[in-house]
Image (cartoon, grey):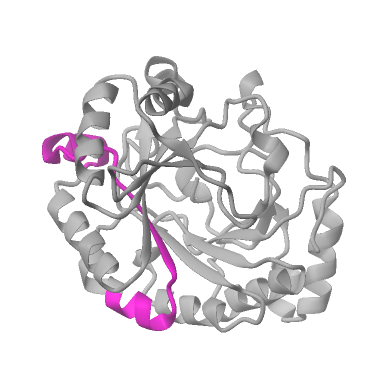
Amino acid sequence: MLEDNLGRRFYYLRLSVTDVCNFRCNYCLPEGYTAADDSPHLTSAETATVIRAFASLGTQKVRLTGGEPSLRADLPEIIAAAKGTAGIRRVAVTSNGYKLPRVIDGWRRAGLDQLNISIDSLQPDEFARITGHDCLPKVLEGIDRALELGVTTKVNAVLLCDGAGRRLRDFLRWLRDTPVTLRFIELMRTGDNREFFASNHLRGETIEGQLVRDGWQLLPRERDAGPAREYSHPDFRGRIGLITPYSEDFCSSCNRLRISAQGRLHLCLFAEQGMDLLEEIRRGDTEVLAERIRALVTQKAPSHYLQQERVGATRNLAMLGG
């Protein structure tokens, strides 16, 4: 089992297949995508090598992220390779949903188990202001189709101060009859969003306290689950999760590692740098790659140090899929 010096075990790989994104979210890429690294992205064969190496170390869940992963035409091939890897129990994709109605059937046939879609508002005009794209109905159509296909579906919403109460009410109305898990994610400081963060950050505990008062119950956390604390309520088909990276003990239960689209191991979303594994990946020797990963994991820091405003090399969340 892959384990660091603090006894944290890593069952969960977040594998970025591209850092390109076609959205211009105001908290991430307000000016749109600009290439900061001209290194080629891993090929589908190279991503398969990475997944096999992690699976040999006990990883059970793979999440394919971006940027926007649907921009890769070979994403179904990558999903199928992950699903066909011995030891991998769950394959997930995180997407902005822009192409979802056209691609979800193919992803499901390839073996997709779980889908995460970003929706920061259920008001079409506000959604367009946040993302730069007026396409909320199309995204919701794709979610409906994913549910029809039996894909476990979660929706990510970044917590923003202005209008937070209204957006929560909209989401609660939607969750009464929609069997998705809505995950509120605290806005995080990155290299590019200092001023936006200062004026928009909202602590997740504010909403969590309201949910508890309204009868929402905390659910047990699976060992390969993400960092959200999930709640259910008997009157709602949907669930709500909270991801609060500024809470004191957030890093103590970390169970995930990240590989960038360029083949770098990031021990934390906010690490000072990625560790280049491209040579080992291109050799295709999963044993050698696994041993290198095992050795590097011992360098994982106890915390992301966000509370001290240390954001490492993370310029924006599109770099590694958040």
- Quarter of the figure with residue 290: bottom right
Q: Residue 206 falls in which quadrant of the image?
A: top left
Residue at image coords 79%, 62%: 293
> Eyeballing the image, is 195 above or below 159?
above
The reply to whether residue 36 is in sight is: no
Above or below: residue 286 compared with residue 229: below
Picture mark count? 0
Look at the image and say whether residue 31 sits in the magenta stretch. Answer: no
Residue 13 is left or right of residue 152, and the answer is right
> Foreground: 163 or 76?
163
Coordinates of residue 35 in the picture (x, y in percent) = 45, 50
Up-down relation of residue 72 to residue 65 (above or below) = below
Seen at 55% across and 50% down, the residue is 226
Magenta region: which residues?
105-132
In the figure, 109 relative to 158: above or below? below
- Identified at 29% across, 48% down, the residue is 23
- Image coordinates of residue 31 in percent, x first then y, are 32, 37
Q: Nearer the viewer, residue 176 or 322?
A: 176
Q: Is residue 127 magenta?
A: yes
Q: Is 9 positioned to the left or the right of 25 in the image?
A: right
- Identified at 27% across, 30% down, the residue is 168
Q: Residue 217, percent across and down? A: 45, 37
Confirm whether residue 207 shows in the render: yes
Give the position of the N terminus as an image quadrant: bottom right
Q: Going by the image, does 286 lie left or right of 170?
A: right
Residue 287 in the image: state x and y as whole percent: 82, 77
Q: Quadrant of residue 204?
A: top left
